[in-house]
Amino acid sequence: MSHTTVASPQEVTIKDKTFTIRIPSAEIQSRVKELAAIINRDYEGKNPIILGVLNGSVFFAVDLMRHFNMSCELSFIRVASYHGGLQTSGQVTDIMGVKENLEGRHVLLVEDIVDTGITATHLISEIGKHNPASLKMATALFKPAALRADFKPDYVGFEVAPDFLIGYGLDYDGLARNLNDIYVLKP
Ligand code: IMP
Ligand code: MG
């Protein structure tokens, strides 16, 4: 049986907005592999719990996990800070909390993107209350110029300019998460 992949267009239109390709899938996958090797080495023998932040981080969390050859667990939590569209609300609403006992565990939070850092700061403080042995964050994308919090992710896939991105888990009004490449909003 032949393996088919969806061809990547240079431009996509989602509702009223047009986006152009910014990080091709092959580049994302090779960076994920590199990052996974580093994380795997750092957490070897620690049986970490990988805590993905829904919905956006699913693709990155699973892709990272596929490269780990250490003992590890996977779980997800859900928060919301975006009310759709292009702007962050600056407020984090807890939707679905932690079910696992994190006390004494090595916890690696996995995010799709750190933009203002408000979500990350909130997560670190909330998860920190569970007394984990260690707590770090891996993010596929990081917008250092958009940062409004005293926070820096520990593992970063790509540092990007503060433009609106879609694809590889990132959405515009709930759409476009399924794109394998990352696209940027056309000015
Ligand atoms: P924060 O501003 O760092 O708290 O980011 C909050 C959330 O906004 C992220 O987890 C994403 O879900 C979303 N977000 C931030 N930047 C973008 C973007 O460029 N495209 C799509 N979603 C984004
Ligand atoms: Mg998110």
Image (tube, helix red, strand yellow):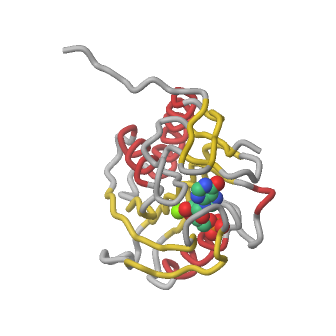
From this view, report whether residue 187 is shown above or below residue 99: above
Residue found at the very far front of the displayed protein: 16
Residue 52 versus residue 9 in the image, above or below: below
Residue at 63 percent of width and 40 percent of height: 19
Judged left or right of residue 111, residue 142 is right
Against 187, is 51 above or below? below
| Place of residue 58 in the rendered image (x, y in percent of width and height, measured from the top left) | 40, 53
| Residue at the extreme right of the image, as rendered | 145
Which quarter of the image is occupied by the N terminus? top left
Seen at 60% across and 50% down, the residue is: 16
Residue nearest the observer in this picture, 143 or 178: 178
Residue 164: image x %, image y %? 67, 52
Q: Nearer the viewer, residue 131 or 58?
A: 58
Q: Is residue 121 left or right of residue 123?
A: right
Q: Quadrant of ligand 1?
A: bottom right
Q: Which is nearer the eye, 59 or 36? A: 59
Residue closest to the far left? 1
User: Looking at the image, can residue 154 be seen?
Assistant: no
